């Protein structure tokens, strides 16, 4: 487990029980197989958008879902950890400095991953947890469009 992960468990002094802290941490920005992610994966599968890879280590940021043949990378971001621009979750009321710094780093890292992927010729889609909850259909349409958008010559080249 990377060092930075351990901080979450001890640093926040918000009035949370140990169990709440752990579950919050488990839903955190690097959590794999989170609820929103599973929701998306199930929808993709049911709509025939199969053949994806999960958390592919070869890609910057290990996108939650990617289609290597289509050069399409999808990040499913938790609104709290990645600071969703749509639902704008409230900042914690305690340890403001710690959290602000933490969130800034998360956002910087997210941006770097997206930039690296784009530089390598990948399409990058960020789907926020709240978007998945509110408009799964819309998310799916976006994925479909991007999935279909890359010409087949590209597909062969990438394979
Ligand atoms: Zn959100």
Image (spheres, rainbow, N blue to C red):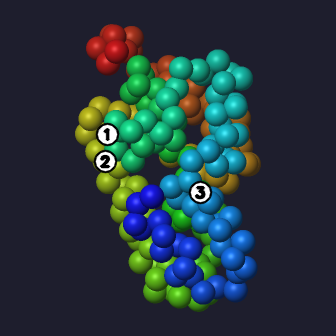
User: Image point 36% across, 59% down: which residue?
Assistant: 109
Q: Nearer the viewer, residue 27 or 133?
A: 27
Q: CA distance from mark 2 to mark 1?
A: 5 Å
Residue name at image x 52 percent, y 86 percent: 96
Pointer 3 residue: 78
Dot 2: few (<14), some (14–19), or many (≥20) neighbours within 10 Å? some
Above or below for 53 versus 92: above
Camera-side mark, 3 or 1: 3
Q: Secondary structure at mark 1?
A: helix
| Picture coordinates of residue 128, whole percent (x, y) | 59, 51
Which of the two labelled residues, at mark 2 and mark 3, occupies the earlier sequence position?
3
Residue 112, how many percent across, how many down? 32, 54
Tell whether label 3 touches label 2 (CB within 8 Å): no
How far, Cα to Cα, is label 2 from label 3? 20 Å
Is residue 128 something that shows in the picture? yes
- Check disc 1: other Cα within 10 Å, few if <14, some if 14-19, many if 20+: some
Q: Is residue 105 left or right of residue 142?
A: left
Q: Helix, strand, or loop for circle 2?
A: helix
Q: Disc number at residue 118?
A: 1
Label 3: few (<14), some or many (≥20) within 10 Å? many
Q: Is mark 2 within 8 Å of ligand 1?
A: no
What's the residue at 70%, 31% (across, down)?
42
Q: Which residue is mark 2?
A: 115
Q: Is residue 34 left or right of residue 54?
A: right
């Amino acid at each position: 487990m990377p060092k930075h992960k351990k901080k979450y468990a001890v640093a926040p002094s918000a009035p949370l029980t140990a169990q709440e802290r752990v579950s919050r941490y488990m839903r955190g920005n690097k959590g794999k197989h989170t609820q929103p992610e599973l929701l998306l994966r199930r929808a993709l599968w049911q709509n025939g958008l199969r053949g994806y890879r999960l958390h592919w280590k070869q890609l910057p940021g290990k996108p939650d879902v990617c289609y290597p043949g289509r050069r399409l990378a999808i990040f499913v971001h938790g609104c709290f950890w990645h600071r969703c621009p749509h639902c704008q979750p409230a900042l914690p009321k305690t340890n403001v400095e710690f959290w602000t710094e933490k969130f800034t780093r998360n956002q910087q890292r997210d941006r770097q991953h997206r930039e690296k992927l784009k530089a390598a010729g990948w399409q990058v889609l960020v789907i926020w947890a709240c978007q998945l909850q509110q408009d799964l259909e819309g998310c799916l349409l976006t994925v479909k469009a991007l999935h279909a958008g890359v010409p087949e010559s590209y597909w062969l080249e990438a394979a």
